[in-house]
Image: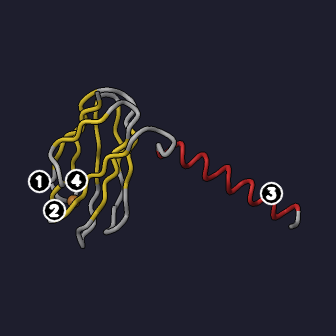
Amino acid sequence: MTARRRLGQGALALCAMLTGSLAGYAWGAVQTVDQKDLRFSVKLVKIAKGDSVEFTNSDDTSHNITISGRDFSVNSGLQARGQPFRAPLVKPGVYKVSCAIHPNMRMTIVVE
Ligand SMILES: [Cu+2]
């Protein structure tokens, strides 16, 4: 193995590590909420601080999730079928979840 290749693999590993911690992979439990028939699979999810919610998309259409709470807002961008979106939620509180494309899609996350 050449030195250049080793360096490349090190950078890749570091990248994966940083991405993982940013996306919350190194944290607590993950609860999954599906989107199907233009609805969230549940209206309310309660999680512990540091846990994550992963949104899956089983619809043929795309969704665009926004999660907002006090001093916090995150947007999934355009989320195609089969493309998961995971949101780490750090602070206790109530978070409203909505889809920018389908105004009737709404749910709540409570971080205890
Ligand atoms: Cu939607």
Pick whichever of labels 2 and 4 is earlier in the sequence: 2
Q: CA distance from mark 4 to mark 3?
A: 41 Å
SS assignment at label 1 = loop
Sort mark 2 into few (<14), some (14-19) or many (20+) by Cα contacts within 10 Å. Answer: many
Residues marked 1 and 4 touching at CB (< 8 Å): no
Residue pointed to by mark 2: 38
Q: Is residue 105 left or right of residue 32?
A: left
Relative to 72, is 14 above or below?
below
Q: Nearer the viewer, residue 87 or 112?
A: 112
Asked whether mark 2 lies closer than 8 Å to ligand 1, one says yes
Question: What element does badge 3 sit on?
Answer: helix
Q: CA distance from mark 1 to mark 2?
A: 8 Å
Q: Secondary structure at mark 4?
A: strand
Residue at 75 percent of width and 54 percent of height: 10
The secondary element bearing badge 2 is classed as: loop
Q: Quadrant of ligand 1?
A: bottom left
Residue 99 got which mark?
A: 4
The alpha-carbon separation of the residues under discs 3 and 2 comes to 45 Å
- The alpha-carbon separation of the residues under discs 2 and 4 comes to 9 Å
The reply to whether dot 1 and dot 2 touch (C-beta < 8 Å) is yes
Look at 23% across and 44% down and name the residue there.
Answer: 97
Residue at the spot x=23%, y=31% of the render? Answer: 94
Callout 4, which amino acid?
A: Cys
Residue 95 in the image, given as x and y percentages of width and height: 25, 36
Q: Which mark is residue 7?
A: 3
**Beta carbon of the mark 3 residue lies under 8 A of ligand 1:** no
The quarter of the picture where residue 21 lies is: top right
- Label disc, if present, on residue 104 of the rendered structure: 1
- Cβ–Cβ under 8 Å for marks 2 and 4: no
Q: Residue at x 17, y 49 (%)?
A: 42
